[in-house]
Each structure stands twice: as structure tokens, then as C-alpha cells.
Image: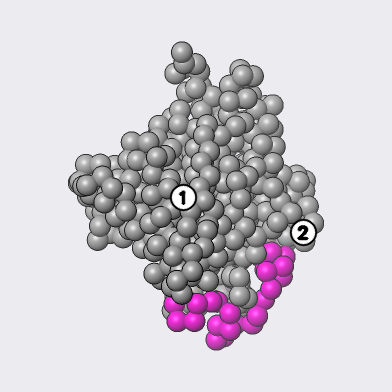
Amino acid sequence: MAADGNSNVNAYAMALEQLDEAASHLDLKRGIVEVLRRPKRELTVNFPVLMDNGDVRVFTGYRVHHSTVPGPSKGGIRYHPSVDLDEIRAMAMWMTWKCAVVSIPYGGAKGGVVVDPRELSERELERLTRRYATEISPLMSPEGDIPAPDVNTNPKIMAWIMDTYSMHRGYTTPAVVTGKPVEIGGSLGRLMATGRGVAFCVARVLERLGMPVEGARVAVQGFGNVGSATAAHLHELGCRVIGVTDIYGGAFNGDGLDVPGLGEWVRGTGSVKDFPGSEPISNAELLALECDVLVPAALEGQITADNADAVRAKVIVEGANGPTTPAADRILVDRGVVLVPDILANAGGVTVSYFEWVQGLQFLFWEEDEINSKLERIMGRSFAEVWRMAEEKNVSLRLSALMLAVQRVHDATLIRGIYP
Ligand code: GLU
């Protein structure tokens, strides 16, 4: 799971600041920028869940569509006590940009429930999921809006959502959600796809900077789906993963952690904490580690104006959505730290979600090597486009990626025209 949420950071304010900065470098129609600054639609649901002890608890959830101009809206569902509407709005907007950066025909969406899932039993989690899925079903469909996993949600939860939606429809509808188990129409390669894409970006950026991939020292914040898969792929690429943290603690070994062993340890104990052969490390220490690459793969708002000066990594590759605030971005740019932004670096997940959706619509399934090579082709092309634009315009990779994305969605909005 993710590290501590940072309640001082408003993600939607961050997203707006980023959009305004990108727009100021582009020649855009003002009214269209105003459209892009706001979510298209927002749904808040308050719903009861029967707890195991017979009590009824009311939970609050959201589903926000930022844009449906490029295609159906797409984005994950998170379960976290710090979820609020502004966070979900920001995440939905970032999904729009992310899909545009990798040229996938989706707009952006996001959903969330205000809950700490660790406090629920398995049955309570299932009842909460099925009720939330029912509550947001007016906004969800294979043609209209397709959820996926995010913080604290997983293939099992996606299976419940798919089953619930299908029960209401009266027939099985696999394409309504992605990130499902492969047994019920999930895609090969989806589980590891975000981490594969992050590791791919680490390798590409190191190559561009003339730094060796083999032996590169990497620190990873967060050991959920994204952090653990990133660490596994980096290990395969020959990098040394020297530090990892999760919400319970951290593990450090300057010679490189035994990443496969760490994966086993986490499956057994639920945390990276106390991993044999490692020293403990705090989250703040991890962010300040002397290393080549830092991969924040937890929650938003982790690298801020307060700690950006402490970062000693030469390169940051964002596995999480929104881990770096705009104020921290400016500090890092001034200090010459190269940062591969979230909307490019973690786009591997939604890219393979797109493959899963296409397979589900057709009931025709692909081989894993086909999926991985298509993913690498898309990530490679997008990385090259973002890098080239950054060089041409002499801007950071974040600004370059945002400029590419905002221009594409702006143009699509203009081409479609304003109805009526
Ligand atoms: N939650 C992931 C993200 O933030 C995946 C979204 C998806 O696959 O739709 O990119």
C-alpha cells in the first residue's frame, strides 16, 4: 500500500496549476481551456453497508469524469481514508492527460471510496464493493466509462465489480472494468504492466543521460502493485534496488536488496519492514537517499517544497500519480534533477487496460509477449515524443508531456465542435 497521504497538498490545485502552466506555453482557444479546467461530470454517493456484527455503516464514494472527448472515460478506483472529491477530480484530469500522452482513445475518470480497507473483513469489503459498483452504475459501462484498480484495489475487487454489473445487465460484460483476474477475461501482463512501464522509463532516461542501467542504484517509495512490480522489473534489468518503504516501515541495503526474496517476505508478512539482510529506513530517509533514481510509487504530494532540497537522486521517475507538487518541481528543475512525469511514466497500466478492454469487447485474447511488445512500442514512442518536445521547447519533461497531452485534447475538442 501507499505511504502516508499528505493532507497539506490539494491535488486538484496542483492539477490546475500544471494545466495553466502548459496552456501558457501553447496557443489554445481560451474557452476550451476553461472546459478542460473542470470535470465534465461528478457523482457523489452515500451508501449503507451491512457490517459483520449486524451494524449498518454509511460510506461515501465518488466517480468523476474529467473528459469524454477522446473516447470513453477510463481510470481507477481507490479505497483510502483520505479520498476526497478534489483528489478524485485531479486524478481524473491526470487520466485524461495520461491517455493523451500515450495516444490511447480514452478520456479520464477516477473513482474512490472513503474507507480504510484494512478495517474491513473480506465479506464487508465485497459488500462495500458491490454496493459502490451499483451506486456508480449510471456512470459506468463498456462504452462509456471503464474503471480499473488503483490504490488499495486489486483484481479480486475488479471481479466483484464486473460480476455486479453483469448481474444487473443479465449477461456477462467483461469490458466494463479492466485489471480483472485472467480467469474471467483479464489480460495477461496487466498486473505487472504499470511497473513494467515505470522500469522501461527508468532504463530509457538513464540511456538518454548516458548513465548505465546495469548497477544503477534505485530507491522505491511504496510497495503496492506499482512499487513491487517496478522493483521486480528493475531488478531484472540489472539495477540495484537499495531501498524501499511502505506504510509500516522500510528496508535498506546499499549493495542492493534481494528483490525476489523481498517479494516473498511481503507476501508472508504484509510489509517490507524487518526484511532479513536489510536495515530499517524511514520514508523521509528514503526520499533523501543518495542514489541514481528515485521512484515515488505511493500517494500524491510526497515531494514538496519542504523536502525537495533533501532529494539527492539524479533522476526521479514517478510511479504514483501526482507525487511531486508544482513548487517541488520548480526546485528540482533548478537543481538539474531530471524527472519523468507520472502521466508518461505510469501509463503502462492504462495502456494494458486498453488492451484488456479491446480483448474483452471482442472476446478474443492475445499472447503475453504480444501484449508486452505492444506496450513497449507505445511507451517507447511516447517517451521519445516527450523527450523531443522537451528539447525543442527547452522545457522540463513534465511540461513537455503536459503540453503534448493538453494540445491533443484541446484539438480533439475543437474538431468535435461545441454541441449544439
Ligand atoms: N489506476 C491506474 C492509473 O492511475 C490505471 C488506470 C486504468 O488502467 O484505467 O493509471
Quadrant (top left, top right, bottom left, bottom right) of the N terminus: bottom right
The reply, left or right, for residue 294 in relation to residue 201 is right
Q: Residue at x 56, y 34 (%)?
A: 39
Magenta stretch? 267-288
Pointer 1: residues within 10 angstroms few (<14), some, or many (20+)?
many
Some atom of ligand 1 lies within 8 Å of the CB belonging to the residue at label 1: yes
Q: Which residue is mark 2?
A: 307
Q: Residue at x 34, y 40 (%)?
A: 141
Residue 60: percent from left, percent from top: 54, 53
Q: Tell whether label 2 touches label 1 (CB within 8 Å).
A: no
Q: Which residue is mark 1?
A: 76
Q: Is residue 295 above or below residue 339?
A: below
Residue 182: percent from left, percent from top: 28, 59
In the rendered image, which quarter is residue 33 located in?
A: top right
Residue 332: percent from left, percent from top: 73, 50
Residue 381 visible to an observer of this rendering: no
Q: Residue at x 46, y 50 (%)?
A: 76
Residue 382, numbered label? none
Q: Residue at x 54, y 76 (%)?
A: 271
Direction bottom: furthest residue: 276
Q: Is residue 293 magenta?
A: no
* Three-letter amino acid code at the position of disc 2: Asn
In the rendered image, which quarter is residue 311 located in?
A: bottom right
